[in-house]
Amino acid sequence: MNVQKRKTRGINMLGGLKHLAGAGAVAALALTAALPLAGPAQAADTIVIGVIQPFTGAIAAYGQNTMNALNLVLKEKGDTFGGRKIEFVQLDDQCTPSNAVEAANRIIDRAVAVVGPSCSGDMAAVQPILKEAKIPHFTPAYLPTLSAQGDDYFFRATPGDGPLIRALAAYIKAQGKSKIALAYDTTGFGVGEKDAFLAALKEFGMADPVVTLSYDFSVTDFSGQIGKIQSSGADAVVVLSYENLQGLFVKQAQQLGLEIPIFCGTAAAEPEFLDIGGASANGVVYSAAYSTDDPATAEFTKAYQAAYGKTPSVVQVSAAIAMYALADIWTRQGPDVKGEALRDELKKLHLKTPAGTAAWTVNGEPADSFAILQTVQDGKVVTVKRESIKAE
């Protein structure tokens, strides 16, 4: 495959853990450094799927959760298609765009599909590479603009931030909150959610935030931000960050006596938010793309819980939908379907799976999805509202 290898110049602004972008790239690829590059015989014997995810670092759970979901689907569907066995090649991007680019460049000559990246900045950074290589790629990344890049090999199995953050803003307005404090991290994900939220405020005729605060992914002390919110006169705060930061924020907010309601973006649906936030997460309302009480995903949720003793999140659901879609195509048409042919088959697909519907619009957005609002009550997740998203 004659594809020019891409450099990382200019992508750190897209997000991810910018402070890890230097020497961290070597460590991030340590897992794949030991993997042999494919020769002709190996390429003919296996169907290679690249898995670009954080396997180490603050949100390393994304990587293992993705692998759990992929392997669970193969346990059901079998791991061999037309005499060729699935080979997953794990590449650790540490949620850092430069690492993701290195990972993509390592795998493009072997992979026929890529699952990931899950981090928005990483996905944005590798899109040109995977598109040029004609490799379909699947992601749960929320950044709305990912589907507006003219990348017809892009498939988002769950909805992006546009409709999800819009639903959150509408709910906040319905609660009568008008003086919003906004806090977000400076990764591509955090900035994307911030932009989506500000757009929703404008759409609904709501006032600009009374205070807007940003912070780096590496922050562990939110006392400065919380103090500014307390003195701002805000009647609600919206926190748009990765789940580990949201968990720290709500915990420290309670400790410092912040008494206004807290609303969070989509990452709060990840289990780590509740793990870190603990009792402080009670009462927080957030937007989500997946719910454990959704009949459309109940079968997968039950199977995942039985296999791993944990409740899946949007990361696992996205990976499972991708694997169900690929397995369906290779079962019906054989393992040689790849590149443009695989893309075209995916675009035509409308498949009901135990994890939800595998069907996409022309832009790679899910054709059948929901915006869900959830809250935490006594340590348990409860669905507040669920509405269908119009496919675009």
Image (cartoon, helix red, strand yellow):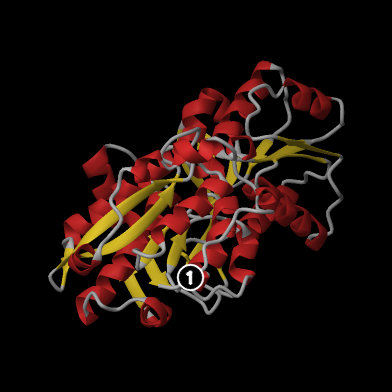
Question: Can you identify the residue that label 1 sits on?
Answer: 3
Q: Is residue 157 visible?
A: no
317 horizontally vs 44: left or right: right
33 horizontally vs 6: left or right: left
Front residue of 342 and 297: 342
287 horizontally vs 321: left or right: right
> Residue 214 falls in which quadrant of the image?
top right
Residue 368 placed where, x, y %?
47, 70
Figure check: 377 above or below 178: above
Residue 105 placed where, x, y %?
47, 58
Q: Secondary structure at mark 1?
A: loop
The C terminus appears in which quarter of the rendering? bottom right
Front residue of 166 and 362: 362
> Residue 46 falls in which quadrant of the image?
bottom left
The residue located at (77%, 27%) in the rendering is 225
Mark 1 surroundings within 10 Å by alpha-carbon count, few (fewer than 14), some (14 through 19), many (20 or more): few
The residue located at (38%, 68%) in the rendering is 357
The residue located at (28%, 76%) in the rendering is 329
